[in-house]
Image: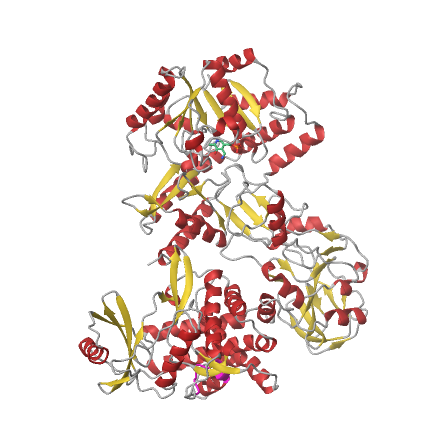
Amino acid sequence: MSTTGIPHLTAAEAVAIVERHWGIAADRVVELGSYEDQNLRIDVGAQRFVLKIAGPSDARPPLEAECEVLGAVAALGDGTLQTPTVVPARDGAQIVDAGGHRVRLLTWVDGQPLLELPALDARALRGLGAVAAASALALAQFSPRAPAARSKWDARIAHEVVDEVLADDPGPSEEERAKLLAATAPLRELLAAGEPTPALQMIHGDVSDWNVIATVAAPGRVECTGLIDFGDITCSWRIVDLANACTAIACRELDEPLHALLAVVAGFHETAPLDAVELDVLWPLILARAAACAALSSRQLRLTGDSGYTVAQYAGDWRALDRVLGFPPGLPVAAIRAACGVAPVPDDPWPALVERAEPLPVVVGAAGHHRCIDLSVATDELHDGDWGQPRAVAALVGGRQLALGRWGEVRLTAAGAPAAYAPDALHLGADVFAPAATAVRAPLDATVVAVGDREATFELAPGRCLRLSGIEVLVSEGATVTAGAVVGHVAERGDHWPTRVHVQLTTQPGQPGLGDPRLRDAWLALCPDPSALIGADVAAPPPPDAAAGRARRASVLAGAQELYYDRPMEIVRGSRQFLYDADGRPYLDMINNVAVIGHSHPRVAVAAARQFRLLNTNSRFLYDSMTEYAARLAALLPAQLDRVFLVNSGSEAVDLALQLARVYTERRDVVALQGAYHGWTSAVLELCTGPDNPVWRDTRPPFVHVAEQPDPYRGRYRDDAPAYVRSVADACSAAAGDGGVAAFISEPLLGNQGAVQPPAGFLRGAYEAVRAAGGVCIADEIQVGYGRTGEHFWAFEHEGVVPDIVAVAKATGNGHPVAAVVCRAEIADALGRRAAFFSSTGGGPVSCEVGLAVLDAIAEEGLQDNAARVGTALHEALLALMDDHELIGAVHGRGLYQGIDLVLDRGTREPAPVHARWVCERLRELGVVDQPTGDHGNVLKVKPPLCIAESDAERFVAVLDRALSELGALSPA
Ligand code: PMP
């Protein structure tokens, strides 16, 4: 790429040229940059054009051909892909001679280069592939009159380009040279073998993220809408454009590069299905293209020295080359094939090889063995996070016995910690757990093709290998072995994991023992079931079909029961502050206040199991745990709240609280806060005036009175507590005409609004007003209570008030249905005088044991203190994040009940629900579970299990920072 001879017209000269030749009076001229030409943006009012002043390069198609292609593409496309068209000059010419240069004026394609947009999701990447395909389809119908010149950017001849660079003096380093040769070898072999190659056609030649134009249709939603710069059109294979798009993406910072490339390929395939020949050629082509780009950028760096641009280009190109060379051998081809719906490994000879040869067992005693150890995500054998501990797994396998570990199992032991990418948890081989020194045999005649650290790979047939790892190897590379020969012994381990031989069929040496479960079809085709070599069935049952499962759910569950996420992951397991999906991927859970002491807490599991075995009956029998639990609950509350009812859910608790208030006051009217949610029973839903009850305005009964939401951030009276108190008093007055107010109900901290904290003094004033009107005060502590707010156990304590009735649920049972109403004795007695109260399962022995276990864990594990400590640090970190992200309007709440309020404008505080949804989807991709809440669905919840560590909070903030930064760059123009 020579940078000499690029034209340099001044803005004034450009203005004069467009005036003279096109009769256009330009208002503004903006330099656009180009390798070989001068490109200027010409603005005429709101209209834009591109003035292209051709450089001297002769290694390009003639301008006439390019003009013709532009016309053809624009005419042939279906209109979904925007491309520039040539604006004829006044005399009708497409190319004019001006100032000694050949000049064209093109229409402007709206949007911005894909390159400028970070964090492209799978949809956007598929869009890139679809653009490459659409352009290929359009150009296929076009035969240019002028022949296209040979282009160094044509991936079809990438190996020749690499050879030219390798011949430079000085050329690339030895290390670079080796990589360039490795990456071009598959294309060279394919061409040398005389395999069929794809048909030739006209192609764009540079479909990349700088020439594909994207528009941001909605926050975070990138659409690939245009393709520009047809200056590299050439005659080649259409998949060259796909390979170019793939290598352009491989240059980027990516968490999951192979998945990104697969999305691009899938997008192409959806629009222009790849045929068998193209599927064979595509990966060699991608490798070769990456090599050619890296080779050329090395040369450029040597020629021009380290200017910023060249260095960045070099780094990107070599990153791409390292990436594509670094994928496990065989995987990209198999995964591409699987993504295109064809067999990942063509003509699979594995079954014939393994079955016909009647292999001998790798470990003699394992043949016919049936004891398979369940190490899957759903295993019942490992608990409480102990799957990360080798000794626990070793204990499970058990001393000196033989046991088997399954092939095709997603392994909990490989889950690791939450990360921005999914773990390689799919077990590609099988284990024979056996004592150290157990003899390991070759099951078939074979040649030793690789020996590594405690492992060896044997070739059984061309392209069919057996990997045995975890053994002291007794054979050396190149040796041939016969079936039954002892090739090693099970090795001792220094790390306490159980000793074992891992038996894996592979297509070539170098394939890992664990793979990405999302590439299951590809991986298990490359590394098929080794049962025959072990003499026992070691295949894990295949996972249920996720799509069928979702369809079944939709057919049997009422549609009103919604799911989180656009594409919900199947959650299989929970442990402490983490959730695990069916692929073994762990997520940091930022929203489960129900699992207050942590998911699947052993204390709860043990207490429930023990009590279930002993007794579970109804609360009309006398048993001690009910008394004990009620006493423990009452002891946590102010002394006057001393009577406890046990029920099953928050809705029931609030419903009962209402009944109590009504019976006690002999009134019916209730005052609730605007936007409240208190539960779903018919009586309770009448009080709900938020998004969970969208019809409330039409259905609100006359005895329900709604007071202003005391939201200092967005509420009508901002932080004017007396004004909100007046609103409550007014509502009480309105009730007076109907017999008077029975009760006022609120969350002391507005949990469903996203932890909005009413202005200081509000609750005290409201309680006074309600009591003055003869009503009682109900605190709904269902979301915000139970130690979550840190400093105090109950949220009302922060406000210096004492309610008359408290409703508590969710955290009480850590997910088991346990809920309670606690009130003053005289209120409870009023109900007792009228009728008996009985809930069949409310307060049953199991529920009470669970409730006690939760309280014990909160106390013994210092979880309330942890909520205060981690919550404070988290709050400060979130506030600091506001410096970098205008989108955060406020951070509400305290302790481990907070809300991150996303706004379009800090001045108007207009909520940003679309942004909030995007952020939550993105956080999930990055390994964090979060959801929006609030009246407008724009507040990110922060209410994790209270056992969350400070490091988790830090990670949450870092991941949120990243998502918000990406979103900042992905906003509609
Ligand atoms: N009150 C509040 C404040 C709640 O948030 C909820 C549930 N989200 C309920 C009551 C109802 O609880 P449940 O779902 O256990 O019936």
Figure check: 465 above or below 946: below
Q: Foreground: 435 or 841? A: 841
862 shown above or below 117: above
Q: Quadrant of residue 847?
A: top right
Residue lying at 34% horizontally and 66% vertically, measured from the top left: 110
Question: Which stretch is magenta?
Answer: 150-159
Any part of residue 676 in sight: no
Image spot of residue 579 (x, y percent): 55, 46
Q: Farthest residue to the front: give it.
A: 91
In the displayed structure, 933 sits above or below 400; it is above
Please name the residue shown 68% across and 55% down the image.
498
Q: Specify whether residue 153 is painted magenta.
A: yes
Residue 867 percent coordinates (x, y): 45, 37
Q: Nearer the viewer, residue 146 or 861?
A: 146
557 to the left or right of 304 = right
Quarter of the image for the C terminus: give it.
bottom left
Q: Residue 480: horizontal and vertical position, in percent?
A: 74, 77
Q: Give residue 8's position: percent from left, percent from top.
A: 23, 80
User: Which of the 4 quarters of the picture holds residue 427?
Assistant: bottom right
- Most distant residue in the top direction: 833
Q: Is residue 542 above or below residue 852?
A: below
